[in-house]
Image: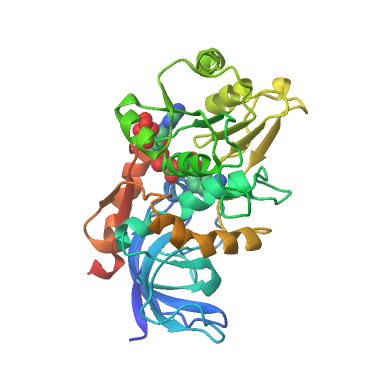
Amino acid sequence: MSTQKALYLLQAKGQFAVRERDIQEPSSGEVLVEIHATALNPIEWKIQAFGLFITEYPIVLGVDAAGIVKKLGAGVTDVSVGDKVLFQGKFNTRYSTFQQYTVAPAELVAKVPSNLTLDQASAIPAAVATASLGLYSHNEADGIALTAPWEEGGRGKYTGEPILIIGGSSAVGQQAIQFAKLSGFSPIITTGSLHNEAYLKSLGATHVIDRSTPLSTLPAVVKEITSNPIKVAYDAISESETQNAAYDVLAPGGRLVIVLPGAVDKVKITPEKEISPVAGSPHAPGKHEIGRNLYANLTGLLESGAIKPNNIEVLSGGLAGIPEGVERLKKGVSALKLVVHPQETV
Ligand SMILES: NC(=O)c1ccc[n+]([C@@H]2O[C@H](COP(=O)([O-])OP(=O)(O)OC[C@H]3O[C@@H](n4cnc5c(N)ncnc54)[C@H](OP(=O)(O)O)[C@@H]3O)[C@@H](O)[C@H]2O)c1
């Protein structure tokens, strides 16, 4: 078989459509993966609605996937044909995941442990990368350079230090909570809807602040929880209001990770508080080493339950189910990743 089905975004701000395309050959160091599950991310509706980032159309989107290795490129020794793997794609039709087959660098795939389904595994890569690279990347351009839990001395290194995570119920926020727990942070204070409180506590949050609480009161609310200075904050939502509130909570010497472009009011920015955007992809420039280390450790973190998968819902229709999912993400979901099965595309 040499062709497959793929979901194309036909033009800027245009429609999605399923089309045939060639199955790629893996180059040296790459593997060909038959994609059994791919998860959606908010960036896909933003690309469709606003025409962000993409300069050449038509394009296949999708960056979250899990599947079965079908072919090895030259020099691949750590991965075998038949392995179940999860991996992050890129917004480049050769490497994206809204298709039935794609290629991926072998060093950036992780074997799926037996305690996870491929559906669960598919929803992990982008959220795990965004959370962990934001906290642990030593890259000058982004990340706040904490010691990762997979590095020597990293587990529990920040015991007793508080952390604020805005938007704990988001896919990224859920993973940020779990990495914060592995790093030893305490208390782990997050914001979210109270119907998610028990779930967020099961992941490691110690305090869940109702996200409908006026953000102007956040510094006072956090102070009631801990009198220790907040030196690390992760804003997994990064709207203007949440960035400003997180920045207000931060103590001098503190560092704030943001997942969208900076929106803290210029008048309040001080050199005493660092704002660090994150590019949540192991393929991003400067991320090669940390990406490799993350992927070398990911299977173990998932197998031990140290990192748990997000809740998922599988949409019907294979790749043709994605446009409906994109609309749902645009309206907003609560602590849920939407997944499709590309092999079910008719
Ligand atoms: N920089 C990067 O590389 C990168 C990578 C991935 C994602 N992102 C961006 O990161 C953001 C989160 O992505 P995601 O996939 O994690 O999103 P998501 O899972 O779709 O987020 C949905 C959740 O956001 C929560 N939420 C929404 N507004 C909130 C607010 N004002 N305060 C607290 N919680 C709020 C909701 O919580 P409740 O249900 O509890 O109300 C909901 O569960 C998006 O803007 C995305 O584009 C950036």
* Residue at position x 39%, y 36% in the image: 169
* Residue at position x 48%, y 51% in the image: 128
Looking at the image, what colour scheme do you see? rainbow
Residue 285 rendering spot, x and y as whole percentages: 67, 59
Locate the C terminus and report the quarter of the image it occupies: bottom left
Locate the N terminus and report the quarter of the image it occupies: bottom left
- Front residue of 45 and 225: 225
Task: Report if residue 103 is visible in the image.
Answer: yes
- Front residue of 55 and 145: 145
* Residue at position x 47%, y 15% in the image: 214
Query: Is residue 181 toward the left or the right of residue 322 in the image?
Result: right
Q: Is residue 237 above or below residue 21?
A: above
Residue 113 rendering spot, x and y as whole percentages: 36, 64
Q: Is residue 238 above or below residue 220?
A: below
- Front residue of 290 and 343: 290
Query: Is residue 216 toward the left or the right of residue 318 in the image?
Result: right
Query: Is residue 101 toward the left or the right of residue 237 in the image?
Result: left
Residue 146 rendering spot, x and y as whole percentages: 65, 44
Task: Report if residue 10 is visible in the image.
Answer: no
Residue 71 rendering spot, x and y as whole percentages: 43, 83
Q: On the rendering, which quadrant does ligand 1 occupy? A: top left
